[in-house]
Image (cartoon, coloured by chain):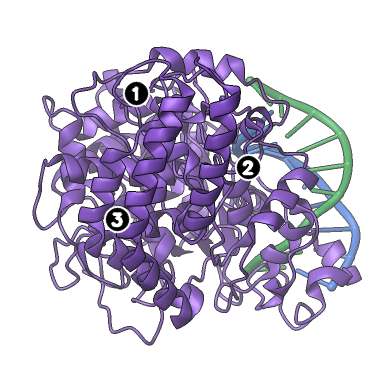
Chain colours: A purple, B green, C blue
Amino acid sequence: VTPAGFVFPDWAYKPESSPGSRQIQLWHFILELLRKEEYHDVIAWQGDYGEFVIKDPDEVARLWGARKCKPQMNYDKLSRALRYYYNKRILHKTNGKRFTYKFNFNKLVLVNYPFIEVGTGRGIPQSAPPVPSGGTHFRFPPSTPSDVLSSSEELRSPGMFSSVARRMARGSVSDCSDGTSTNSELEEAVGADERGVGAERAFRGLLPPRLPHESLFRVYGGAPNPADPLSPFPVSPLPGPGGLLAPTLSPALSMTPTPHLPYTPSPSLSSPMMGSHFSFNPEDMKHYLQAHTQSVYNYHLSPRAFLHYPNIVIPQPHRPTLEKPPTHHLHLPLSHPLGPHPGGAEEVQQHPSPFKFKLQPPPLGRKQRDSGSSLASASSSSSSSSTSQSSFSGSGQLGGSGLAVEPISDIESEEEVEVTDISEEEEMNHIDEGGVFNPVHQANGTSSSCPPAPPHNHQDEDDDEEVFKTPATPPLGSAGPPFPLLNLQSEPGQAAPISPGGTRCIPLKLRFKRRWSEDQKMEADGERDEAEDKKVRADGGLETKGEAMEEAGGRKRGAELENVERKGVILGLMLPPPPTQRRASSELQRATAQLSLENTGC
DNA sequence: TGCGGAAGTA
DNA sequence: TACTTCCGCA
């Protein structure tokens, strides 16, 4: 449970899901097969980003059965398991295409496959899933906008691909003692010691032995260059400085290929993490961390995914957040010792949350849909076939309750997901209605702190919902490294856990004051950004979202970083995303004034 | 070929 | 929880 009391889906945490684990989950397994050339004839990426076709259902079933020691496995059963993922939004069926499914990458946890390679379409290595051809249109199911695949060892570092692949390979192999194992070759490649590694371990395993976290970070440093086969951000339709967002976020941004963008995925690699150039600079690291953090939250990644880095502020709603740096407040004092923050645990305990966050409610069942649930299906569901792929644009209405939305979003067509802005109020309502409440808010009493999410257009409401509901802080999973983010949750009103500099308990007054001044400064800086944002928004929601993000990332990076650096964690927590920036600012001021009177110290 | 309910399993 | 197994239905 996160400090805020939120809980991430189990599947996001389970170490057993790690490659090579006997407990591997089906989707992990599928990914493993997909990445292996040797299974190209059995299963392969095809079509849109994340879409894959099972060319030999029986074989896939057999492999799966072998892996799980279920000799009786067959495609019928396997497909049932896959269908089971529909509800979890991990997968969805590609309508009209036999044996074709599509990953909702954003839902997947990259933790165990931190470097999964997200490539691009046809003709590319199996390890590389088709990438959106460049459209910013998000086509993934509404529920998973940011589809980042978690499996990603390769994603992050193509250079490590081979070793990773080998590692991963073992995961594909069956460990059955009964000799059902089908891929001995894979097994050989795998070392017994490697089995059952946790996310952390997976990370490390993927990296050169001695590389510190920085090694991961630098991957993000480079600007993605679509033209460059080695581009770290092959998936990104909009090449640019925004490379930082790549690994985790890129998928989210540009999940779906769109015709209008001439972007050509790089065939061979695609590891977002593999930048055309690396940089270890703090900024990049920060960005990386930020992106990472965000992705963890946004995509419901396992907390383990968080790097052991203190003071990372988790941006609340991902997309918007990214766009607006100031909001993200990634505070990463480099000098800070890596590792969990002592205060983190405390925080967690301090905010036991009553809510438990789970994946969104499953999409409406066939029956429900058939019966013609008035809600979403009103428009076009009938025409579509059974799966969620049916094209809907019914995003128009966000159901009153967060839960209610689910079905709708589910129906939304990937192709034409209309983005609906979710206002803060709405979000809040969702949360409230959903029974989710951010303790922080409550505790604070200050509306300005930790705004749920900036309004942002999102294709998938589901995800958004999740994101919104998702608390800022990840749970301190047993498996996970301590959450650097924990302190993020600290509210201004309460004892400040830990400040960025490692300072504990800065007087509220002081903090606010500091923040205020910074805020104002930021506003000045942000002026330009805002203008840009507006422009971007005006251009058209989703369409430009990816672009906006990247652009923002690139152009604003400097300013952002500045702001980020200037801002303490606390500030980061409190500041809302840009659109709301001003508002937040004023609120802050108000709050500050109020608090200054009320609080005399910590 | 695909869906999804239901019960069962570990 | 994450399937596995079975099955009726479309």
Q: What separation in Å lies between label 3 and label 1 (alpha carbons)?
A: 28 Å
Q: Earlier in the sequence, mark 3 or mark 1?
A: 1
Q: Give the chain of mark 1.
A: A
Which mark, by number, is residue A246?
3
Q: Amino acid at mark 1?
A: Arg
Task: Give the residue type that dot 2 points to.
Answer: Ser
Mark 2 residue element: loop
Choose top left, top right, bottom left or bottom right for residue A389: bottom right
Residue A575 at what x, y percent from top left?
Answer: 47, 45
Image point 25% across, 47% down: which residue? Answer: A561
Going from N to C along the chain, the mark reached first, 2 or 1, is 1
Instruction: Confirm whether circles 3 and 1 share one chain.
Output: yes
Label placed on residue A195: 1
Return the x and y of residue A274 as percentages of the image width and height. Answer: 17, 52
Q: In what element is the residue under mark 3?
A: helix
Q: Nearer the viewer, mark 3 or mark 1?
A: 3
Q: Relative to A42, does residue A137 appear above or below in the rendering?
A: below
Secondary structure beneath dot 1 equals: loop
Q: Is residue A104 above or below residue A116?
A: below
Tell me which chain the residue with mark 3 is part of: A
Disc 2 to disc 3, how far (Cα)? 32 Å
Question: Disc 2 and disc 1: Cα gap in Å?
Answer: 46 Å
- The answer to whether residue A38 is visible is no
Amino acid at circle 3: Ala
Q: Which quadrant of the structure image shows residue C9?
A: bottom right
Q: Residues within 10 Å of mark 1 (few under 14, many from 20)?
A: some
- Mark drawn on residue A447: 2
| Residue A287 to residue A5: above or below | below
